[in-house]
Amino acid sequence: GKDKASFSVPAFGDLEQMKVGQKVLVVGSTVISSFFEGLNEGGKIDLNVTKPNGGAIVINLDGEVLGIALSSETISFAPIKSITDALPNS
């Protein structure tokens, strides 16, 4: 038989449970690791990523999705809770 690749949807992480100093990974055109420095006033995290990584998934070391790095004139961040809240319930 042939081996087949299988993929699963990652679990969603909770930014409120993150501790300052934990690592987060930005997985886009490259993989960047950063330290979580806490939430800013908008309940988001500050990321130091390049524009080519705009749209990259941001995960914790447990593989849970924390959000998406958005590319605009400055890199911003969309927490996963904001994304799931914007989607209709099915």
Image (cartoon, rainbow, N blue to C red):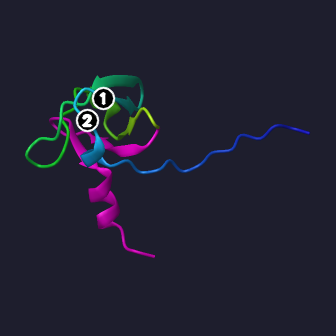
**Amino acid bearing label 2:** Lys
What residue lies at 34% left-to-right and 41% top-to-bottom?
55
What residue lies at 26% left-to-right and 27% top-to-bottom?
49
Q: Name the residue under label 2.
A: 19
Left or right of 40? Residue 66 is: right
**Amino acid bearing label 1:** Gln
Extreme residue in the bottom direction: 90
What residue lies at 37% left-to-right and 30% top-to-bottom?
25
Label 1 to label 2: alpha-carbon separation: 6 Å
Q: Where is residue 81 in the image (x, y as percent from the top left)?
A: 30, 57
Q: In this view, does 37 lie above or below 15?
A: above
Residue 47: quarter of image: top left
Q: Is residue 89 magenta?
A: yes
Q: Is residue 36 above or below residue 66?
A: above
- The residue stretch that appears in magenta: 63-90
Label 1 with label 2: CB-CB less than 8 Å: yes
Quadrant where the N terminus sits is top right
Q: Residue 22 carries which label?
A: 1
